[in-house]
Image (tube, rainbow, N blue to C red):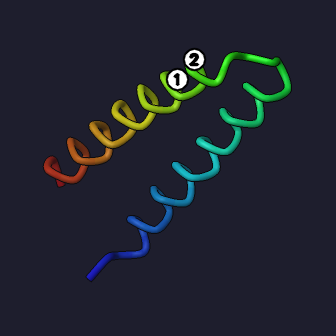
Amino acid sequence: MLVPEDFIYTAVYMLLSVLIVVYCKLCKIKNSQAVCGVTLFSVMYWLFFFSDAFVK
């Protein structure tokens, strides 16, 4: 069962992902670059999440 802290991490992740996509649309960044940015952000974010989870 997920603890509330996990929901906070997921909500922050979704919010930041949406902000990245909106920023890319507003600044007219190419779709391929936006996808690369969101992918790299996702990898780094979840690496932090899981490393933090293993430390606890």
| Residue sticking out furthest to the left | 54
Q: Residues within 10 Å of mark 2 (few under 14, many from 20)?
A: few
Indicate the position of residue 54 as horizontal and vertical percent values: 14, 50
**Front residue of 25 and 3:** 25
- Type of the residue with mark 1: Gly
Q: Does residue 20 sit above or below 55 in this rendering?
A: above
Outermost residue to the right: 26
Between circles 2 and 1, the one closer to the viewer is 2
The residues tagged by marks 2 and 1 sit, at their Cα atoms, a distance apart of 6 Å
Q: Which mark is residue 37?
A: 1
Q: Secondary structure at mark 2?
A: helix
Determine which residue is flagged by label 2. 33
Looking at the picture, which amino acid does disc 2 mark? Gln
Residue depicted at x 41% and y 66%: 5
In this rendering, position of residue 56 left or right of residue 34: left
Q: Which quadrant holds the N terminus? A: bottom left
Residue lying at 61% horizontally and 42% vertically, measured from the top left: 16
Residue 31 is situated, as x and y percent measured from the top left of the image, at 64, 24
Depth check: give the residue in front, 21 or 13. Answer: 21
Q: Position of residue 15 (x, y in %)?
A: 64, 50
Classify residue 50 as left or right of residue 39. Answer: left
Crowdedness near tag 1: few (<14), some (14–19) or many (≥20) residues, C-alpha within 10 Å: some
Q: Position of residue 41 (x, y in %)?
A: 46, 30
Q: Secondary structure at mark 1?
A: helix
Compared with 28, 38 (above or below) is: below
Q: Are marks 2 and 1 in contact (CB under 8 Å)?
A: yes
Q: Nearer the viewer, residue 20 or 8?
A: 20
Quadrant (top left/top right/bottom left/bottom right) for the C terminus: bottom left
- Depth check, front residue: 3 or 42: 42
Query: Quadrant location of residue 9?
Result: bottom left
**Residue 37 placement, left or right of 45:** right
